[in-house]
Amino acid sequence: MPSDLLFTVTKNVATPASAISLADAGLRERRDLQEWILAHPEILGEDIMVVTFEFDRWWAQGAAPADRLDVLGLGSDGRLVVVELKRDKAPDTVEMQAVKYAAMASRFTPESLSTQHSRFLGQRGQAVSEDEALQRLVTHAGELDVENLRRPRLVIVAGDFPPVVTATTVWLTEMGLDITLMQVRAFRTANETLIHVSQLFPVRNVEEFTVSPRQAEVKAVEERRRRQRDAVQLSVLSPLRFSRTALYSHCARRASTPRSGQALTTGSKRTRDRPMRAGLTQCLHRSSGRQMVIDTPLPASPHQ
């Protein structure tokens, strides 16, 4: 079954539209696809404004690159949006081409963005100074932080994507890049041509299709259970973590503390130490039956 079905409806009759390529529809990349995006940047995603298009004013020591960036946008999050357009099926290396443009665009500054945005608005019939252009950018995205500008998002728009491109895009996303694949398809009816735009990647999370308790309540329950598990593990494992030195110190303290109602022993030091040594021996004997002791030598008794 095809992924998308479009129908025209006349009264109570639904007539399916036929899927065709953009080329068969007589549509072109720059004249049509690019112009649609300039007029409707929501095609690229939510809260994106166009900064400029067909940008080729790169600079580098030696020969300047001749690459032309199709569309440069700016998201409301303050990150640049690098857009690569392909009318038909995208070539196998389109994602690497977009990565290259993103690397070059990451060197834009707020000042250079305002310059290019002013020039873009002038080409579209709006005479705007660079200061006014900068204000428009700041109004849309807030403060233009250079660190944010260094991490552009990538959007590739094409009629179709081969498996090698989608596989590479998934891997690049797992490596930390932000890439979106948008598919543009054409449909023909008896009287008109229709355009359908859909996001191919990233795919929607399965959680978006389910009904569950409020996220905060779920997290609270999970945190409570985690603490309970930690408490149980601590109560089980804590006796096992005594070293022999720590166990000796513990029993020595218990043996040297007189119990309630016990009279202090008088006489020579050797005589006074006998009850303490006996208590120490009993404590160690009782503890050895229920504790796993790390093999650390016991300190020698000062009276042995």
Image (cartoon, rainbow, N blue to C red):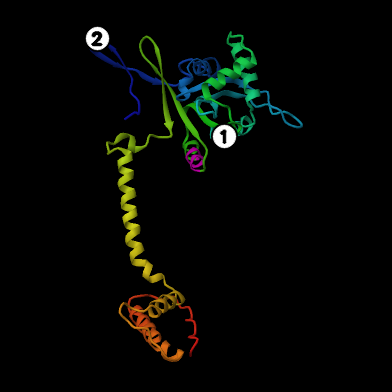
Mark 2, residue position: 11
Magenta stretch: includes residue 2: no
Instruction: Give the vertical position of 104 relative to 227 (above or below).
Output: above
Residue nearest the observer in this picture, 6 or 224: 224
Q: Along the horizontal axis of the image, is 118 left or right of 38? A: right
Q: Along the horizontal axis of the image, is 247 left or right of 141? A: left
Instruction: Name the residue rendered at 33%, 76% in the picture.
Output: 290
Q: Which mark is residue 101?
A: none
Residue nearest the observer in this picture, 281 or 145: 281
Magenta stretch: includes residue 172: yes
Q: Position of residue 287 (x, y in %)?
A: 35, 78
Residue farthest along the left direction in this orientation? 12
Q: Position of residue 123 (x, y in %)?
A: 61, 11
Badge 2 marks a residue whose secondary structure is loop
Q: Position of residue 70 (x, y in %)?
A: 58, 23
Amino acid identity at mark 2: Lys
Residue span colored magenta: 168-174
Amino acid identity at mark 1: Arg
Quadrant the N terminus occupies = top left
Mark 1, residue position: 151
Q: Position of residue 141 (x, y in %)?
A: 53, 24
